[in-house]
Image (cartoon, helix red, strand yellow):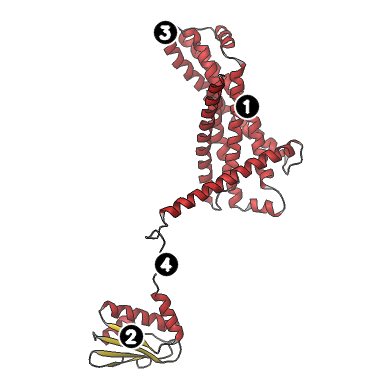
Amino acid sequence: MSGSTALYSLDSGSGESVLRLAGDWGEAARLPAAAEVQRDIGHPDRVVIDGSRLASGHPRVAAFVHALKQALVEADVAVTARALPRDVEALMALASEPPPKTPGGHGRPHPLARLGARFQRRLEIGRDTAALVGQALARTPALATGRAQTRWRDFIELVQETGAASLPVVTVVNLLIGAVLGFIGAVQLATFGAGMYLADLVGIASAREMAAIMTAFIMAGRIGATFAAHLATMESNEEVDALRMIGVSPFEFLALPRLAALTLMMPLLYLYGTALSIVGGMVVAHIVLGTPPMAFIERLQDAVAARQFVIGLIKSVAFGVLIALTSCYIGLHAGRNAAEVGRAATRTVVVCIIGVISIDAVAALCTNALGI
């Protein structure tokens, strides 16, 4: 019995069939289907596939024998191959090898391996962050003396973007925060007949905490996200690599002017926000408690010491450095695709907000311990 006299022949005996492959199984040959040959073979106890008459060890032979062998084994037929070309045997051995198993099974790495990889990434982030801070400390004098690889035109534009362009948002947010503080304080203090101390509450809260924190939040969402998205886009477009190729330091050309602009503008925005927050509280005090503005200001001068502004200024500088370094680091380490741009901006805002709150908490503990 033979399905194709040119490519194979079949000899059936008692319980055993011999399938003899022959001829050239190259690209020009019309190969038989494995299912068709299996039907010709039937259901003997044993099948021998003989390749002694093949003209060459073409890979199509290995594919055919492998498929036929799997079909016969599933039908509980014992299969033996003999005299196959060496190349065909090698391909079949490779196809029969089980896929490599991962230590954790199910294609997922072992939990300890994942924990180790995560710890290694954290170490790399810590190392890169330390390197970024070290570069900032080492190259800031070069920027101040004009020896850094940066352009003053870019620096001026960044100052305008971080300072003047942010004034509308800083104005609205701090004015409303001061009004909210004034309203809450007025209601509570009026209950105890202590409305005259509203200036103390609004002044200290604005100068020491709220103006610096709210301004930092605004800058993280507006400027930090912009910096990160811009640098991530440059990284995606390989513009950062181009700077390195021509011998320009990406940190000095891109990160250092952003760090300087934001660190310079944050204290000024803080003072501006503090003044507006106090104005908001003063307006509420006049409306709710009937406190004259001059009386509010006189009480404010007695209640708010200069150290409250110094604490706020120091924190605003720390917040500016944090936002600038975080946005530059995330932007310069973003992936090389468009999706990473959005992720870099989002990650910057989240990290900056957590960092601002953490710095403020540490500052509160330190000032409390020092009795300030």
Q: For the residue marked with disc 1, what is the amino acid?
A: Pro
Residue 336 point in image, percent of width and height: 56, 53
Tell me which residue sits at (55%, 46%) in the image. Answer: 125
**Circle 3 is placed at which residue position?**
192
Label at residue 100: 4
Q: Earlier in the sequence, mark 3 or mark 4?
A: 4
Q: Earlier in the sequence, mark 2 or mark 4?
A: 2
Regarding residue 26, the answer to whether it shows in the image is no
**Circle 1 is placed at which residue position?**
267
Q: Is residue 301 above or below residue 28?
A: above
Q: CA distance from mark 3 to mark 4?
A: 76 Å
Q: CA distance from mark 1 to mark 2?
A: 84 Å
* Mark 1 closeness class: few <14, some 14–19, many ≥20 residues within 10 Å: many
**Circle 2 is placed at which residue position?**
80
Does the residue at mark 1 contact the one at mark 4 (Cβ under 8 Å)? Answer: no
Does the residue at mark 3 contact the one at mark 2 (Cβ under 8 Å)? Answer: no
Q: Earlier in the sequence, mark 1 or mark 4?
A: 4
Q: CA distance from mark 3 to mark 2?
A: 99 Å
Q: CA distance from mark 3 to mark 1?
A: 36 Å
* Mark 4 closeness class: few <14, some 14–19, many ≥20 residues within 10 Å: few
